[in-house]
Amino acid sequence: MSSDQNQAIQPERKTLEDRARMTELERIRHSCAHVLATAILRLWPEAQFAYGPPVENGFYYDLELSHRIAPEDFEAIEAEMKREIKANHPFERREVTRAEAMADAQSGRLGGLGPRPGNPSRFKLDLLAQIPEGEPISYYQNGDFVDLCAGPHVMRTGNIGAFKLTTVAAAYYKGDEKGPQLQRIYGTAFKNRTAMDEYFKMLEEAKRRDHRKIGAEMGLFVIDTEFVGPGMPLWLPKGTVLVEELEKLAKETEFEAGYVRVRTPHLARERMYRTSGHLPYYAESMFPPMEMPLEGEARARERELAQKVEALRVRCSAPPAGATPEETARQLEELKRLEEAHGQSSDRYYLKAMNCPHHHRIFDAQPRSYRDLPLRLAEYGTCYRYEQSGELFGLMRVRSLNMNDAHIYCTEEQFAAEFRAVNDMYLKYFKVFGLSKYQMRFSTHSPSGLGKKYVNEPGLWKKTEDMVRTVLQESGIQFVEVANEAAFYGPKIDVQVWSAIGREFTIATNQVDFAVPSRFGLHYRDRDNTDKTPLCIHRAPLGTHERFIGFSIEHYGGNFPLWLAPEQVRILTLGDEEGLVRYAQPILQELRKHQVRVEGDFSSTPIKAKIAEVEAARVHTMLVIGGRDVEAGHVSVRLHHGGPQGASPKERVMADILQAIQERRS
RNA sequence: GCCAGUUUAGCUCAGUGGUAGAGCAACGGUUUUGUAAACCGUAGGUCGUCGGUUCGACCCCGACAACUGGCUCCA
């Protein structure tokens, strides 16, 4: 994928070398962003501009303006943009000194049509401060509009062939949730009208493939927000087929690769997530805990403890007149101790947001020898994550999810081979699904996050990151390395894929964990009769059912290969005459006997109508049976989206269907 | 969570300050057929929820919820 996609996700300063590599189309779009700013300033001269880069499908400009720009404003803005393009102003580059740039920013000239006294260009001032000492500072000017910009641009505004504003959104300045929120105007631009029309046609097609639309059409899943809750899909029978076919594939693949399966509950005590270290990092994303009533003695003890704490609190907040400072300090100490004990004695349960701690406890449930390693524990575990409401998105981002999870416990020596095997498993899956557009992202820590976002083990970070990098390089896998995106317990590889709509998703993950096993005190007895802590690899090549199926729906446009199709075969008779039904019925029975998902339509409905219905339902194969077929011992095959395939002996057709399913033929 | 928009029948959508329509789907009939839609009929909605303005609200205003497009986050 283009580097702009990454820039959009992770806005880092482009280097001058990056900029020099900007394609013609990117230059057009970047220039169009300047033209957009020019137009907005004509309408609202006080607007303040921040970033205005090209992105994968167009460009945007972030701005601050008291007027809320709405799509109704687009017409007026586009009219101004057209004027600027028609004027065909050249984009003139000028290098300036830092002092000059600061002065122009102060006067409001930068990112404006002229000086704006009392309205300094505050974002440009901030951007200036980010330009490293010694790097040239440049302006680009088109007409009256002067912007702080390293370029490059097209020669003239007239070189922007076709453009259109698309949406308005909010964006945080520099992506910081706590920073100021700006208005972001998105648009797109192309060399000419034809290219732009093609793009919008593609968007239309993408909309048709949207997994939410197809999911409803095909009856795959529903999200019942009223009774179940947002982000918690219900799998309908046809969607459940997809879930179970995926599980079958995963179980077979993992079995072959030496995994063993386990099953764990959906809940665990608070202690689990305190020990794992997830709570401090992750509490926001977990459903709030369930407080369990205590019983018997525990309850009496708890009550006594609560009283003691309360009494001590009163005494500490208002010490008696004669109390010495030592006494007060001692009581504060005591209060702290009791409060802690009080907190620990409560009985809280959390819905699990991840399976690893449960698996760690399984590892610890039996004594382990180096001979047991690598131990690969696999589970399709159900997890619950309290994602922010604005994050929820069809099947792609949900609150209840089924992970294709496994944890591999291994020695350092085994690590490389195991990690490589996991990567190979990804590639194997991608082949089954015909996924060719993907990118491996190697996420590392950042030293500034140590002790906050990341466990404070600089040495281990370096060591494991080196190990992963080496594996990737040795196996010749293309990857990009991204700093400051690791898990809190170690570096990871995420596999990004792009849906038909061009949306980017992390579909799979492969993570190293050097921290949590030791927190759980996991160990194995090594050759030299000492206890050692294993390394742990967290991996989920198929991600979650929810996301993977959501993605597959869009990938296939709902036209699943035979092995995955919710309804694989439908048998259609030409009318409901007894002879036809008598011939068709045993074919249906025979296929069912072999676990084929087959239905029959032996009604009197006209054949054209039956076919129309089956095509709309996206059933993979149709077997049409009329008088001619009965006479010859044939069935007429028709494929969804493939049209009539002619008549063949029924035994041969059935055998071929079974084989295609068995091979998971694409 | 933040910004903007949307919410009318199962689905796709009309509609007006004076208490709602179409097509498809569903259901009941008729129809007996060779590869994407045969005909007739029936039923279906306190117009997202709650509150306000009004003689009167699906329509105007407000709050909330869900969804959509982004941002932040992420499997």
Image: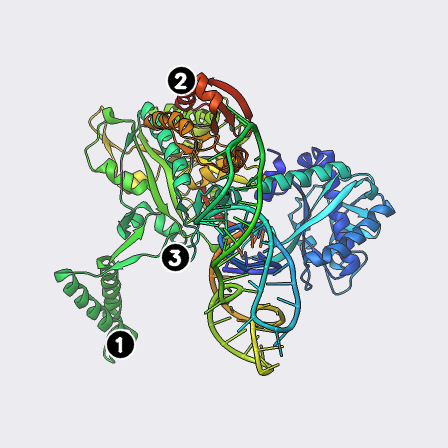
Q: Residues within 10 Å of mark 1 (few under 14, many from 20)?
A: some
Of callouts 2 and 1, the N-terminal one: 1
Quarter of the image containing the N terminus of chain A?
Answer: top right
* Label 2 vs 3, first from the N-terminus: 3
The chain under label 1 reads A
Report which quarter residue A63 is drawn in.
Answer: bottom right
Of marks 3 and 1, which one's residue comes earlier in the chain?
A: 3
Type of residue at label 3?
Phe
x, y (%) of residue B1? Answer: 50, 60
Q: Which residue is mark 2?
A: A651
Q: Residues within 10 Å of mark 2 (few under 14, many from 20)?
A: few
Q: Which mark is residue A227?
A: 3
Amino acid type at circle 2 is Glu
Q: Are marks 3 and 1 in contact (CB under 8 Å)?
A: no
Label 3 Cα neighbours within 10 Å, binned few <14 / some 14-19 / many ≥20: few
Q: Position of residue A315 (x, y in %)?
A: 25, 75
What amino acid is found at the position of numbered circle 1 in the picture? Answer: Pro
Going by the image, does A552 lie left or right of A153? left
| Label 3: element kind | loop
Is residue A332 in sight in this rendering?
A: yes
> What numbered label is drawn on residue A319?
1
Q: Residue at x 33, y 29 (%)?
A: A251
| Residue A440 in view of the camera | no
- Residue A81 in the image: x percent, y percent? 79, 50
Q: Is residue A649 left or right of residue A114?
A: left
What chain does mark 2 sit on?
Answer: A
